[in-house]
Image: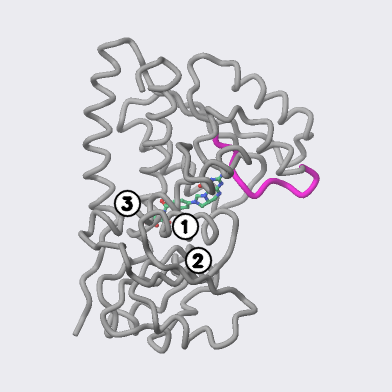
Amino acid sequence: MTATIISGKQVSEEIRGSIAGEVKELAAKGVVPGLAVVLVGEDPASHVYVRNKEKACHDLGYYSEVHRLPADTSQADLLALVDKLNHQDSIDGILVQLPLPKHIDEKAVINAIAVDKDVDGFHPVNVGNLVIGDDSLLPCTPAGVIELIKRAGISLSGKHAVVIGRSNIVGKPVSLLLQRENATVTMCHSRTANMAEIARQADVLVVAIGRANFIDASYVKPGAVVIDVGMNRLENGKLAGDVDFESVKEVSGPITPVPGGVGPMTITMLMQNTLTAAKRHHGLA
Ligand SMILES: Nc1nc(=O)c2c([nH]1)NC[C@@H]1CN(c3ccc(C(=O)N[C@@H](CCC(=O)O)C(=O)O)cc3)C=[N+]21
């Protein structure tokens, strides 16, 4: 039996449709959501993302600025740009593309972004509010994972969700959001013993480890939902997830592809966060 494919592309289009409606309403009030993206140096993976993001902004009628800075930009200059964007009225959201060159302290940069403009949800105040369960700008990829599961009509309440990977940008926050949806959550990571055995207990398996095609059918209970957050560039230039899609789809339930799964949702959630930030900025939410 071949599984249903959960199309992040299709779900994204749905959500972008409703965002576009809200953008129209805001425009009537003279408000245009504005996003600034800052890219330091030449990470090729980053460029795909920035290109897709620019397109999304354009399609939705957002104002957008992309600041492409040379790899040898000093930390002081980067912090000065962030400070300028923090105070710029046309900008509601700021995203500083990670990773940054080694001579720049990422924490110092993230901490410098105004909490209300932190559309990545990486500032410690937003992370703290996520942990507590208070209102915050949610990190885009984890928020996209939850939205994708919900819109595929899958209920999480009481389900066993297993998250593989414990990064600050995906594994940790997605596990908190799954708990918020009343799932029972187990986290696995590089030191986990018997990972396949634990993964096979999952009703919902979320994989974010950054190893191409690592998760095969031996990790998957028949019928389980599989969400692949991996984004690995192969030598042939193709994009591969962390899940061996071809073998896993023969045993799993609904499964996300790469590309066309979580990736487009990440960008859609960035647009959603920027809209939310714009509404709050203008006292409309
Ligand atoms: N501060 C910061 N925030 C980020 O959210 C962030 C970042 N830095 N650094 C880089 C990673 C990577 N990332 C992607 C998101 C979507 C696609 C995406 O749209 N993928 C499409 C198309 C990919 C393709 O065609 O090559 C897909 O999966 O279908 C790609 C990459 C966000 N990141």
Q: Are marks 1 and 3 in contact (CB under 8 Å)?
A: no
Looking at mark 1, is its residue's CB closer than 8 Å to ligand 1?
no
Give, as a single range, the part of the protein colored magenta. Answer: 95-104
Please indicate whether residue 17 sits to the left or right of residue 232 in the image. left
On the rendered structure, is 79 left or right of 62?
right
Left or right relative to 137: residue 40: right
Under mark 3, the amino acid is Glu
Q: Is mark 2 on a helix, strand or loop?
A: loop
Separation (CA) of disc 3 from disc 2? 17 Å
Q: Earlier in the sequence, mark 3 or mark 2?
A: 3
Q: Decide: marks 1, 2 in contact (CB < 8 A)? A: yes
Q: Which of marks 1 and 3 is nearer the N terminus?
A: 3
Q: Is the magenta stretch mostly helix, strand or loop?
A: loop
Q: Tell me the crowding category of disc 1: few under 14, some 14 to 19, or many 20 or more residues within 10 angstroms, Cα based.
A: many
**Against 236, is 18 above or below?**
above
In which quadrant of the rendered image does the C terminus lie? Answer: top left
Q: Looking at the image, which residue is at 58% across and 43% down?
A: 128
Tell me the residue that label 2 is attached to: 208
Q: Quadrant of the N terminus?
A: bottom left
> Which is more foreground, mark 3 or mark 2?
3
Q: At numbered mark 3, what does the secondary structure look like: helix, strand or loop? A: helix
The figure's colour scheme reads one colour
At 64% from the left and 47% from the top, the residue drawn is 42
Q: Quadrant of residue 64?
A: top left
**Mark drawn on residue 174:** 1
Which amino acid lies under the numbered mark 2 shown in the image of this protein? Ala
Q: Name the residue under label 3.
A: 147
For disc 2, the neighbor class at 10 Å (few under 14, some 14 to 19, many from 20) is many
